[in-house]
Amino acid sequence: MALEIIRSVADLRAQVKAWRSDGLSVGLVPTMGALHTGHLTLVKAAQQTCDRVITTIFVNPKQFGPNEDFDSYPRTEESDAAQLRSVNADVLFAPNAAEMYGRDGGQTQVSVAGIGQTLEGEHRPGFFDGVATVVTKLLLQALPDQAFFGEKDYQQLSVIKKFVTDLNVPVTIVGVPTVREDDGLALSSRNAYLTAEERAIAPLLNQVLCDVLARFQAGEDVEKLCQAAAARLQAGGFGKVDYVTIRQADDLTQNPTLEAPCRVLAAAYLGKARLIDNVG
Ligand code: AMP
């Protein structure tokens, strides 16, 4: 089947209805485009368990802050479509902002307290409201059986699981492990912002996180470890470090212990790019 590109919610629903009447299951992979192997890994994961897979591309204005990179965010739909064809994806759903939010821009938002207010929620006010709102809409537009998200954005995955549970959205959220370059750098559309010099520095983020995790497991003090890690990033060429932290993996609250799963998360600037990563 050739890749079908759909622009309207009505057409998307008609397609899903036709699949449903054939008894087929449906997977959803939401993205902002500028696709890379990480995104394609989500599509392949969806294809493993779903008969048909919808990949969405929507650069969501509501999740960008006023000083963030909404205007300059890479928009590469033609090459994205070619990549989706290369993995035999079924549908690309790429609505414009008017189709997504209507003429008044949409007056309703989904907001997740607690897990949505720490870390990225603190450093990027409004970010998770934008993500939760658009993902809710995409889930209601497509009504998939399963939706797939990367652990690369671990807190985002956790926030999505939370509102899906809280709002009884009838979908299974599946987390997919982070896809990395050979040197450990997590694939990200924003890596395109890195100069050659910055690209050479970037893998330090993952190295530092792995090091923090190993030392935490060896019994070192959390506070000291995280402070030293931030200093190491800056000494290595990173700019402002928003956070390096060890959290409980299930709800991202503080005071991790060696007895329960934990996650080490960080966000730091490298030139124009703000890189995030996490290990568990
Ligand atoms: P984005 O287009 O950056 O908003 O990402 C769309 C989806 O792809 C999100 O669920 C991300 O977590 C996921 N994703 C992005 N980069 C990676 C990666 N390197 N490995 C796995 N998933 C990823």
Image: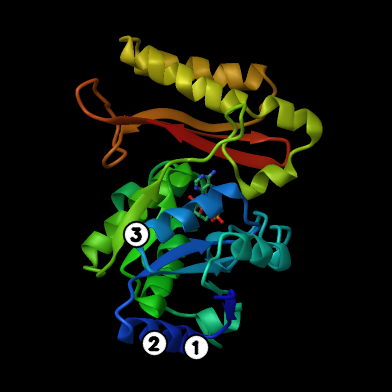
Q: Position of residue 32 (x, y in %)?
A: 58, 61
Q: Position of residue 243 (x, y in %)?
A: 49, 32
* Above or below: residue 216 compared with residue 23: above
Which of the two discs, 1 and 3, sits closer to the camera?
3
* Three-letter residue code for mark 1: Asp
Judged from the image, the secondary structure of the residue bearing numbered disc 2 is helix
| For marks 1 and 3 on the same chain, the one whose residue lies earlier in the sequence | 1
Judged from the image, the secondary structure of the residue bearing numbered disc 3 is helix
Is disc 2's CB within 8 Å of ligand 1?
A: no
* Three-letter residue code for mark 2: Ala
Residue at horizontal 43 percent and vertical 44 percent from the top: 151
Residue 11, numbered circle: 1
Taking the image as shown, residue 181 lies to the left or right of residue 134, namely right
* Residue 204 appears in the figure: yes
Which image quarter: residue 136?
Answer: bottom left
* Residue 95 appears in the figure: no
Q: Position of residue 93 (x, y in %)?
A: 54, 75
Pointer 1 with pointer 2, Cβ within 8 A: no
Q: Which residue is mark 2?
A: 18
**Which of these two is toward me, 48 or 97?**
48
* Above or below: residue 236 compared with residue 46: above
Q: CA distance from mark 1 to mark 3?
A: 24 Å
Q: Which residue is mark 3?
A: 49
Q: Position of residue 161 (x, y in %)?
A: 30, 55
Work out which residue is located at the far front of the displayed protein and give it: 1
